[in-house]
Amino acid sequence: MIKILSGKEIAEAIKHEVAEEVKKMPTPPCLHVIRVGDDQASAVYVSNKIKSACEVGIISHHTHLPATITQVDLLEKIRQLNEDESVDGILVQLPLPSHISEEVVLESIHPEKDVDGFNPINAGRLFQGKQTLPPCTPAGVIEMLKRYGIVIEGKKAVVVGRSNIVGKPMAMMLLQENATVTICHSRTTNLQEITNQADILVAAIGKAGFIRSDHIKEGAVVIDVGINKVTDESLARELFDEDELDKRLKAIREKGFTLVGDVNPKEAKQKAGFFTPVPGGVGLLTVAMLMKNTLRASNLRRKKSAFNKS
Ligand code: GUN
């Protein structure tokens, strides 16, 4: 019998724990979010982050800059926030307009305030198994596996996708938990042969419903990190079983799309032992882990500043 891993309960539990910690602090942590341009999805993500911060008692500020801002001006804004003692966490929402280098911008965020965990210093620390601010989505996956009591140690884990944001850090975190890890990607030959061996299969490729029954080992834990828009009713029919289909078709007719992960849910439900739904799975954890990282960044900076003063 398949078990659906709900992100909602875990995200609520994490946020509750963060809120309890925040209550004990003399002043709450402060998160500063920068959004550049008018990407609609980014606007929704940023408003979710600010709403969550408010729920857990973290102070949040939002700077919305025009898409025409120069890279120099954006870097100057980040420099000011890096130096601002009242700011614990800085997050620049991606994607950025094409004239701005994401790499340069992410490197400019001070590693101690890098609550997204995207700065190469934090990525390098993760790579070396040192304490770091970890990227929120893969950290959320590990948190979910642990809180559902799923053993990682000694298991074969396969990560499909090698992005800096999810695939690579996910593989490092699974390794840190003593899984035997394989990373697959768009050039992998015989993908099915590899994914079929996975006790834990993480899909982070950005292709709607790409992982099908043939990719999944009977009883595997299947973690779907993808968030894709499906606009086509016939594709929706391939992806959803009867219980779900009406709701999804209604969404396509009313909103123009429905959200789907990288795994075909209809097929995964028949093969996997555990499965994360989209929406309602890993996505909710990303924001909860951002709150946890902001609390952590704040605690680390306060400890360091107390140490420097003593
Ligand atoms: N865009 C999509 N996901 C993310 C994320 O986790 N962090 C940031 N900063 N931008 C994103």
Image: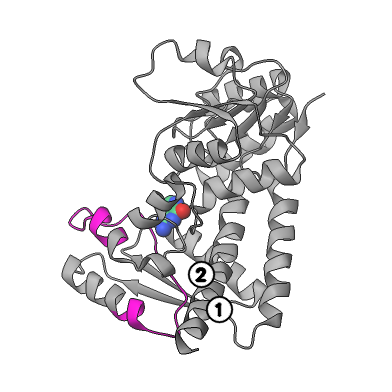
Q: State which quadrant residue 23 falls in.
A: bottom right
Q: Secondary structure at mark 1?
A: loop
Q: Can residue 305 be seen at all in this image of the molecule?
A: yes
Residue at 39% in and 54% down: 118
* C-alpha separation, residue under disc 1 versus residue under disc 2: 9 Å
Q: Secondary structure at mark 2?
A: helix
Proximity of marks 1 and 2: CB atoms separated by less than 8 Å: yes
Q: Which residues are magenta?
A: 80-106
Task: List the residue tagged with mark 2.
Answer: 297
Q: Please give the label number shown on residue 29.
A: 1
In the image, farthest residue toward the right: 1
Would you say 73 lies left or right of 235 here? left
Residue 82 located within the stretch drawn in magenta: yes
Q: Nearer the viewer, mark 1 or mark 2?
A: 2
Residue 287: horizontal and vertical position, in percent? Answer: 57, 58
Q: Can residue 41 be seen at all in this image of the molecule?
A: no
- Which of the pair 34/249 is nearer the observer? 34
Q: Quadrant of the N terminus?
A: top right
Type of amino acid at the residue the image marks with label 1: Pro
Residue 287 located within the stretch drawn in magenta: no
Residue at 30% in and 81% down: 80
Classify the position of ligand 1 by quadrant: top left, top right, bottom left or bottom right.
Answer: bottom left
Would you say 273 lies left or right of 173 here? right
Residue 63: horizontal and vertical position, in percent? Answer: 38, 75
Q: State which quadrant residue 43 falls in.
A: bottom left
Type of amino acid at the residue the image marks with label 2: Ala
Q: With respect to residue 5, does 96 lie above or below?
A: below
